[in-house]
């Protein structure tokens, strides 16, 4: 079934942000220095303005909000980098990196040749996107799946991409989120939701195998998802 986006409370979001900080800090030596710089810089600037330009102390309130925003931006960027790096070469990596993107309904393993050769489906305002993993043999599977669902979606655009790190792939798995977000908006969100439900009714060829995505990737994407939902 397609991944459903659940509402999160403020407390649960704080918890996942804390998880993201721990996850990223364990794997990225630059994270803490960059995070500290992002948070402290606004206060340094305001202090200089207060001391030398006699700005009001109320500017520290603005510095606080800017520091929080800058800290979250750095956290999101560094977490994304770590998650992308750890996903490379792992079965189900493309799904792991797009699951939870706001505005997209993602279904893993809609067709598969094996546990490492599979096709994932994402439905959004661009239309339907089919992402194949597992090498050149999966390209034929992409074509078959496109033909199957084209009968259901009619004139809605259906994009197919083979992602990975090998020769013949359309682009690296680490680029999948960026490529997805750059696609043109061809339909509205209401139509996208309708299409996703119709495609769900078709069923899936193979459920994604248990444990194809590394635990560390799961942890990172869950934390990152909480921040992305807040945008």
Image (cartoon, rainbow, N blue to C red):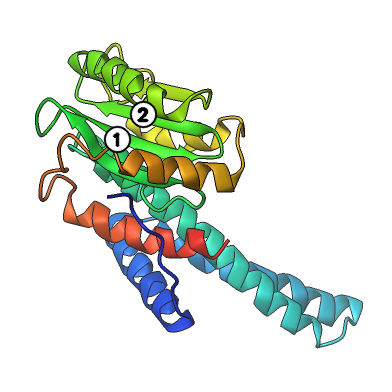
Element under disc 2: strand
Locate the C terminus and report the quarter of the image it occupies. bottom right
User: Residue 207 bears which disc, if any?
Assistant: none
Q: Residue furthest bottom?
A: 57
Residue 213 position within the rendered picture, expressed as x and y whole percent measured from the top left: 19, 47
The residue labelled by disc 2 is: 130
Q: Nearer the viewer, residue 145 or 184?
A: 145
| Residue displayed at 54% across by 65% down | 230
| Residue displayed at 44% across by 39% down | 123
Residue 84 visible somewhere in the drawing: no
The residue labelled by disc 1 is: 120
> In this rendering, is residue 167 above or below 158?
above
Please give left or right for residue 78 compared with residue 214 in the image: right
> In this rendering, is residue 153 above or below 68?
above
> In this rendering, is residue 116 above or below 195?
above
Residue 24 position within the rendered picture, expressed as x and y whole percent measured from the top left: 34, 60
Q: Residues within 10 Å of mark 1 (few under 14, many from 20)?
A: many
């Amino acid at each position: 079934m397609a991944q459903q986006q659940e509402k999160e409370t403020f407390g649960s979001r704080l918890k996942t942000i804390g998880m993201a900080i721990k996850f990223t800090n364990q794997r990225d030596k630059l994270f803490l220095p960059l995070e500290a710089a992002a948070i402290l810089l606004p206060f340094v600037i305001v202090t200089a303005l207060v001391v030398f330009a006699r700005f009001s102390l109320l500017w520290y309130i603005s510095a606080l909000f800017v520091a929080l925003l800058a800290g979250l931006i750095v956290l999101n960027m560094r977490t994304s980098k770590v998650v992308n790096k750890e996903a490379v070469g792992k079965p189900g990596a493309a799904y792991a990196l797009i699951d939870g993107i706001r505005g997209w309904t993602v279904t893993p393993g809609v067709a598969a040749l094996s546990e490492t050769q599979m096709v994932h489906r994402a439905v959004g305002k661009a239309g339907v996107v089919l992402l194949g993993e597992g090498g050149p043999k999966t390209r034929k599977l992409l074509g078959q799946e496109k033909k199957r669902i084209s009968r259901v979606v009619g004139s809605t655009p259906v994009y197919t991409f083979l992602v990975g790190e090998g020769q013949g792939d359309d682009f690296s798995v680490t680029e999948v989120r960026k490529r997805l977000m750059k696609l043109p908006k061809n339909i509205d969100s209401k139509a996208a939701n309708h299409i996703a439900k119709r495609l769900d009714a078709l069923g899936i060829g193979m459920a994604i195998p248990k444990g194809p995505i590394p635990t560390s990737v799961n942890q990172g994407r869950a934390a990152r998802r909480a921040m992305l939902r807040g945008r």
